[in-house]
Image: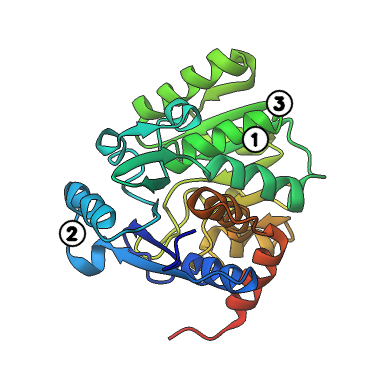
């Protein structure tokens, strides 16, 4: 850690309600570290993914320790980096950029955050057959995590079927074709699934709605939505109304924060303390 402390930022679209900055800084306080975290909201700034080169250069020049990369930049950032971790290459998505001097290194903590959060909050749920919506940057990582969690069969859907097929082919090669498939009929798959994962941006601020027809939900079908701003998406609210077990992305974010802090600074953050802070933040009124 430098004498001036730790400076990190988040690059993405519609991230004003993200509580990741506060989660990082509160844990920094708990560890006695000077920790500054800035939002770089492309929507607020009128920018797009094409501005990533200039933003990365600015972060390096300004002495940032690193950046968290979120929708829609997790894949667009990859060719701009000096090196990429093996896991991020496998997942074809980067959500963390560590700055080492004038060099940038890409990592992926999405899969780790999802896997640890699921174990912590949903580890007792059946997972013989699971439907996942979304195969983008976060979706590929969540699908990888599902394989690591030993989901019996993951059925993947995405509006970009070619993208989804690439994820299926990649994971089938590593974990076996019996454990993952490209979906064609959401209704039919949900009827026989144990669980549903939303790893698409549908439901986020700026992307309202539900990734599936809400009438397809049932009490026995657990639902995980990796979104946590808003705290309760339309999908999660509908699941809870009918008594289904449901989890948002807050725990995933907390476990990711701990891993990101380690990457940025070497700090040994406590994911359960971060989760407690996150739940406290969720109770605060927002402007």
Q: Earlier in the sequence, mark 3 or mark 1?
A: 1
Q: Which mark is residue 152?
A: 3
Identity of the residue drawn at 65% across and 42% down: 115
Please tell me whether residue 69 is drawn above or below residue 230 in the rendered image: above
Q: Is residue 222 visible?
A: no
Position of the C terminus, as image quadrant, is bottom left
The residue that mark 2 highlights is 47
The residue that mark 1 highlights is 130
**C-alpha distance separating marks 2 and 1:** 36 Å
Please tell me whether residue 239 is drawn above or below residue 44 in the rendered image: above
| Residue 155 image point, x, y percent | 57, 29
Identity of the residue drawn at 41% across and 47% down: 98
Q: Could you classify mark 2 by the number of other residues whose Cα lies within 10 Å: few (under 14), some (14-19), or many (20 or more)?
A: some
Q: Are marks 3 and 1 in contact (CB under 8 Å)?
A: yes
Please tell me whether residue 107 is drawn above or below residue 234 in the rendered image: above
Q: Residue furthest right?
A: 124
For residue 208, which quarter of the picture? bottom left
**Element on which disc 2 rests:** loop
Single out the mark in the foreground, 3 or 2.
2
């Amino acid at each position: 850690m430098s004498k001036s402390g730790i400076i990190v930022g988040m690059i993405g679209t519609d991230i004003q309600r993200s509580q990741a900055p506060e989660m990082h800084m509160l844990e920094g306080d708990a560890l006695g570290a000077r920790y500054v975290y800035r939002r770089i909201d492309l929507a607020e700034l009128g920018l797009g993914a094409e501005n990533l080169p200039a933003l990365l250069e600015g972060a390096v020049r300004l002495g940032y320790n690193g950046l968290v990369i979120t929708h829609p930049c997790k894949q667009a950032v990859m060719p701009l980096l000096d090196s990429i971790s093996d896991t991020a290459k496998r997942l074809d998505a980067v959500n963390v950029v560590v700055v080492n001097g004038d060099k940038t290194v890409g990592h992926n903590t999405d899969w780790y955050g999802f896997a640890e959060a699921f174990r912590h909050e949903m580890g007792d749920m059946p997972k013989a057959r699971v439907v996942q919506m979304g195969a983008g940057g976060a979706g590929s990582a969540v699908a990888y995590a599902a394989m690591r969690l030993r989901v019996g069969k993951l059925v993947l859907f995405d509006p970009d079927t070619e993208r989804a097929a690439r994820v299926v082919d990649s994971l089938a090669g590593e974990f076996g074709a019996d454990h993952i498939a490209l979906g064609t009929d959401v209704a039919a798959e949900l009827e026989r699934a144990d669980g549903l994962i939303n790893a698409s941006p549908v439901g986020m601020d700026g992307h309202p709605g539900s990734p599936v027809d809400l009438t397809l939900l049932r009490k026995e079908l657990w639902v995980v939505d990796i979104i946590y701003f808003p705290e309760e998406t339309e999908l999660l609210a509908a699941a809870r109304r009918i008594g289904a077990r449901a989890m948002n992305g807050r725990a995933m974010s907390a476990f990711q924060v701990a891993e990101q802090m380690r990457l940025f600074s070497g700090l040994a953050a406590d994911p359960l303390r971060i989760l407690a802070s996150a739940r406290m933040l969720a109770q605060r009124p927002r402007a």
